[in-house]
Amino acid sequence: MSKHWHQVMVFVVALGLVGAIFSAAMVWVDPATVRADATAVHIVTRSHPAATYSRVGWTYFAALVEGQQLTSYDLVDPASQPVRVLCANLTEQIITDFGPPPCPPERAVLEQGDAAVAAWQRALPEDVFSPFLITPRNTLLLSPQPIIQWNPVIGADGYRVIVRGPGVNWSADIDDPYAAQLLYPADAPALEPGERYTVEVIEITGGQEGASSADEDAAISFEVMAPEDAGAVEATVEQIEAGAPEVDVDLATAYYYLQMGLNADALAVLLAQTGDLMVETCPVEAGAALPEAASPVAYLMLGDLYLATQLEIYAGLSYSCAHDLAIAAGDIETGARSAAALARLALDDEERAEYVKEAAALWEQLGAKDALEALKAEFVGIEIE
């Protein structure tokens, strides 16, 4: 399938996995009868190739990869080897027997997103020849000293970075043509909680201003979280790390940041796992062995995050890598979700149809009838056998 991104479409999605609710008996559960803890999310922190899971409404099982988000109604088959999960209440449980995650139902901190999927619409793609803003955009921030990151432009001599907002009109010139980020300094005007700020990055060539990130067709701004709220978030992150000290909990931390609207902080955590796909290649080609610690769920989360912050080129690269990693790992659900996401982004009708048909085939492979019907309803103009 073609992976070229000539133009992209915006599809604003709820961050986090919006899954169904499941029972240990593998029968459909009436939502009206489900306990309040049904929205709790348990993050897989250690798995192995033989482990599998299934959800209510599925007929079959899929490979269980690290980072996958489970509910208390999913079924896990650890296949005689332990699987570790960080439960929604930030305690660690080790799954050794077939059944639902053995997580306590009370005091859930990690929860599913419940926002509805919004209508998607065509938008102008990012211009790779302009210094479009990567972060912070459409986000809360933990720190009043954000890291500002942008797309470096070939041929630029440097950049002018401007931060604007109530009582703030700060700028800095950067002479390094290869620079792509800047820390907002402590001696700059203070960024106050509750106020909205914007960043503009301008290309400087031959001493003259050139292309600007303000030319982008996107409304982007950020806000600093109140100190007391930021302190509570940082305390929770410490709990996440303490809850599973022997394993990597970065994906759980990123999930929590996304849940709190801290998109930029989540992006920093995920990029530490994945690297920048504009300069690095996906760690596996479709059909190859899955590299250690390369979770398709991380790339799917990254795609959702980029899409929600209106970075469609980055979203496409992330979904493409999630797709290839998922196929290599046997992670059928992530494969189906990433294929559907790539279909939404595709402008070419033939490419879109190929992705839709692949997503349908993967949902059929799981026996996930509801997901298949939802796919057909979204792409009504594409015939799915």
Image (cartoon, rainbow, N blue to C red):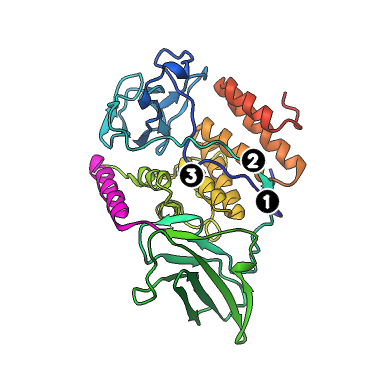
Question: To which residue does mark 3 refer?
Answer: 301
Circle 2 residue? 119
Instruction: Give the main secondary structure of the magenta stretch.
Output: helix
* Amino acid found under the numbered disc labelled 3: Met
Residue 81: percent from the left, percent from the top? Answer: 31, 27
Q: The N terminus lies in which quarter of the figure?
A: top right
Circle 1 residue: 8
Q: Horizontal and vertical percent for residue 120?
A: 65, 43
| Mark 1 or 2: the one toward you | 2
Query: x and y percent of residue 153 in the render?
Result: 60, 71
Q: Give the distance between the C-alpha atoms of the residues marked 2 and 3, in whole angstroms.
A: 19 Å
- The location of residue 303, given as percent across then percent down, is 54, 47
Assign a secondary structure to mark 1. loop
Q: Estimate how packed mark 1 is, as few (under 14), some (14 to 19) or many (20 or more) residues with alpha carbons within 10 Å.
A: many
Q: Check disc 2: other Cα within 10 Å, few if <14, some if 14-19, many if 20+.
A: few
234 falls in the magenta region: yes
